[in-house]
Image (cartoon, rainbow, N blue to C red):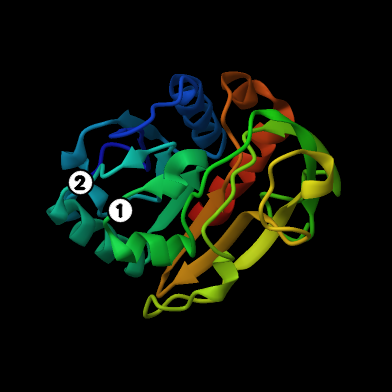
Amino acid sequence: MPTADVLIYARTAGYRHDSIPDGAAALTELAHGLGRSAEVTEDPDAFTPESLAGRAAVVLLSTTGNVLTPEGRVAFEAYLRGGGALLAVHAAANAEPDWPFYGELLGTRFDGHPEIQPGLVLVDDHDHPATAPLPARWEWTDEWYNFTSDPRGTGATPGAGPVRVLARADESTYRGGTHGEDHPLVWCREVDRGRVFFTALGHASETYRDPVFRAHLSGALAWLTA
């Protein structure tokens, strides 16, 4: 049985963000604030049916490259379909490039970013705990991720519900966007009995000390573990 409600996984097999320790500390605190215990690990052996059973949520914190074993992939997919929850943060869009299920689950893949710069996040849907605390036009500085496709356009994963986009990037406020007027940044969906939430934000260490961003992550965890 798991030792903690929330498993925060921070293994990288590609680029490693310096913000991972700050992100892990913040997510641990936010889980505690929701009455949940948390465990931070980079051990792929955490992805077994026994370890995942009973977890309220798994967080992939800026994971990059192939970070799961073949057996771990099988266990993780079964966990999600059986009612588990995934919070994928920032570079988690660049994880598991050789695993079709994961790409279909998120709905898209990372496709580069311009330099870090200020811009605007447009919150389209405030009827969600992760975006309810955010202003409609949120001034923010980050790596503005581009993606290989619109996440709404995929439905190849059996059992996956539609993608619900909660917030977009306003490409007119920064340089280097590739999606035009409709640039999803934050979205969620269900897959069978499980839930998935993705936020493209969270590059810098100071991000995880920002009260608004912390409220964003806390709301995501609250929705996933409800």
Q: Does 142 appear above or below 225?
A: above
Question: Looking at the picture, which amino acid does disc 2 mark?
Answer: Met
Location of residue 190 in the rendering, given as x and y in whole percent from the top left corner: 49, 69
Q: Is residue 4 left or right of residue 216?
A: left
Q: Which residue lies at the image location 25% right of the left edge and 65% below the top edge?
A: 78
Q: Is residue 188 left or right of residue 66?
A: right
Q: Quadrant of residue 76?
A: bottom left
Secondary structure under the numbered disc 2 in the rendered image: loop
Question: Looking at the picture, which amino acid does disc 1 mark?
Answer: Gly
Q: Is residue 138 visible?
A: yes
Secondary structure under the numbered disc 1 in the rendered image: loop
Location of residue 83 in the rendering, given as x and y in whole percent from the top left corner: 38, 66
Any mark on residue 79, and which?
none
Q: Is residue 51 left or right of residue 222?
A: left
Q: Nearer the viewer, residue 144 or 160?
A: 144
Q: Which residue lies at the image location 55% right of the left edge and 39% below the top edge?
A: 34
Location of residue 139 in the rendering, given as x and y in whole percent from the top left corner: 82, 35
Q: Quadrant of residue 203?
A: top right
The residue tagged 1 is 54
Q: Does 148 appear above or below 17?
A: below
The residue tagged 2 is 1
Q: Which residue lies at the image location 80% right of the left edge and 51% below the top edge?
A: 122
Q: Nearer the viewer, residue 128 or 61?
A: 61
